[in-house]
Image (tube, coloured by chain):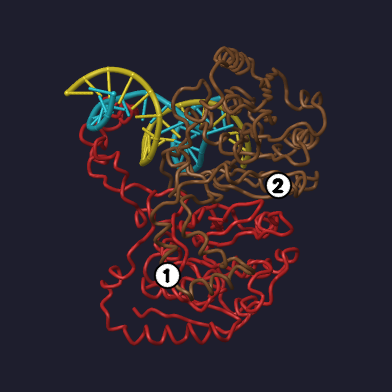
Chain colours: A brown, B red, C cyan, D yellow
Amino acid sequence: MEIRTDVYLSDCKEQLRLLPDDSVDLIVTSPPYADQRKDTYGGIKPDTYVEWFLPVSEQLLRVLKPTGTFVLNIKEKVVNGERSTYVMELIIEMRKQGWLWTEEFIWHKKNCFPGKWPNRFRDAWERLLQFNKTKKFKMYQNEVMVPMGDWAKSRLKSLSATDKIRDNSRVGSGFGKNISNWLDREKAFPTNVLHLPTECSNKNHSAAFPEELPEWFIKLFTKEEDVVLDPFMGSGTTLNVANRMRRNSIGIDVVPEYYEMVKKQINSAELCLCESRAEYGKKVKSKVQRV
Amino acid sequence: MEIRTDVYLSDCKEQLRLLPDDSVDLIVTSPPYADQRKDTYGGIKPDTYVEWFLPVSEQLLRVLKPTGTFVLNIKEKVVNGERSTYVMELIIEMRKQGWLWTEEFIWHKKNCFPGKWPNRFRDAWERLLQFNKTKKFKMYQNEVMVPMGDWAKSRLKSLSATDKIRDNSRVGSGFGKNISNWLDREKAFPTNVLHLPTECSNKNHSAAFPEELPEWFIKLFTKEEDVVLDPFMGSGTTLNVANRMRRNSIGIDVVPEYYEMVKKQINSAELCLCESRAEYGKKVKSKVQRV
DNA sequence: GTTCCGCATGAATCGATAG
DNA sequence: ACTATCGATTCATGCGGAA
């Protein structure tokens, strides 16, 4: 079956209205952060950020399949020496819209921006908020397993009986029971902390996230021929990865330069469609690191 | 000057009223999480957590010095497949009380316990919310510097031309400024992500945090003979560390067993007061790791 | 072909200065 | 007084050229 990549030059709030209900398996996006990227997106003020975003999330809720997932990459900026609360407010308001706030992943940025200030350290992390429409969303956990480091093996082997009992009681029912199962495993499930460097090289986009980020979530929440949507596609990282991984994708951006750039990439990618399906795995090698 | 450690068996909401205004330099605490540890604290329900905590934070705001800092270790639990929003709501309500939400540190729990659920991965991080009373709080950044990454070795052999240019770009100020800043530097400032293992030693407290956690914040926000407060002291980790680091400390807990345990530890520590001040550094060695 | 090494740059933030 | 602009600060990464 052929894999489609649809790209639109439009305000996503409007363009999304044209998509049918319950038609998208995964939304991965990184909207412009408040007051950032003024030159391209006009810079949304922190105090109007929530009202700016809610009409978009309302449409996203409509187009997402009941089994689908929405991953929102965002981080609040510092205003007047304080972290802004618009992300907190956004989570609360999106729940009122009907979203379920399932989880918050952490993107630990090892090579965060340098700088020194008297009252704070460098900001080395961003939020990856997972929202769902229902509790019965699809999750393919086996697709993102990571090699178990030696430290983990040794730690697990050295667990004492009392360790097991205490940790079991700490967390509740049936948590410590499965420990012995883990001792033989070569691979482990990851945690909700992702270690990835930011993309520094020139993508003609100041805020492109590393390919490993959408890749990880695409593996985790979709299978081949599913539909991936990025309503703020920017330089098109999400779409490119989705395309390589044989997922259909839809991208929207209001900036003509990004639209043209992504168009060009997609066209050249389609010329290479002779590549066998099995090949993509070699190119999309995971760099998510275990620490 | 003698270092004091005051321990109270009491509900902290009441006991805090007896402390004078503007008398504490640092508050580090990990309150009972919502609906967990029912046996010991009676289990606060997630939907009443905010109203339960606000009277406490109101008193904390009163007793904290204007230059002081409040570090709150907290993580929302999963209720009905969703992350609860009480931490979000708490941040918003505490700001209404007059707190400044300065920063959110991430405690990345390196060796978090294995486990498997169908719809989520292991939770490997917790929030460390930094609140302040004013923007002019004290922060001793040099106390928590970490070794630089390996890249520095090669980089510092020869400074690049652009580095010199960028350093010299300031108009009219001293020629060459501080190239030596780089040459002498073996340490870098940390970020707002802390990599610490979870506590494994046998504390009789169900949610003891590792000593490195309060230690890091005590180094960062206080100096010797300052006052550290933990209104939910539990097994007394914060107090023990403060004591060793020659900070005065105040601990409160409503559970008699914890009170007795901490009392005993403090007494035996005081018997060792003959130890020279210079010695404590050897015992309180940092384990905060660089990744 | 590897490995090594130099180099630009990035969703930043603060404080001072200017309008 | 309140907002807008600007300079200074700083570290890990990936790329490309060189050995």
Residues at badges 2 and 1 in contact (C-beta under 8 Å)?
no
Looking at the rendered structure, the secondary structure element under dot 2 is helix
Residue at x-position 68% and y-position 77%: B42
Chain of the residue on which disc 1 is drawn: B
Q: Quadrant of residue A233?
A: top right
Return the residue at label 1. Answer: B226
Count of numbered labels shown in the rendering: 2
For this rendering, which residue is in front, B49 or A174? Answer: A174
Return the residue at label 2. Answer: A91
Amino acid type, residue under disc 2 in the picture: Ile
Chain of the residue on which disc 2 is drawn: A
For this rendering, which residue is in front, A83 or A58? Answer: A58
* Residue A238 spot, x, y in % from top left: 60, 29
Q: Quadrant of residue B253?
A: bottom right
Looking at the rendered structure, the secondary structure element under dot 1 is loop
* Residue A144 spot, x, y in % from top left: 55, 43
Report the side of C17 relative to A40 (left or right). Answer: left
* Residue A54 spot, x, y in % from top left: 76, 37
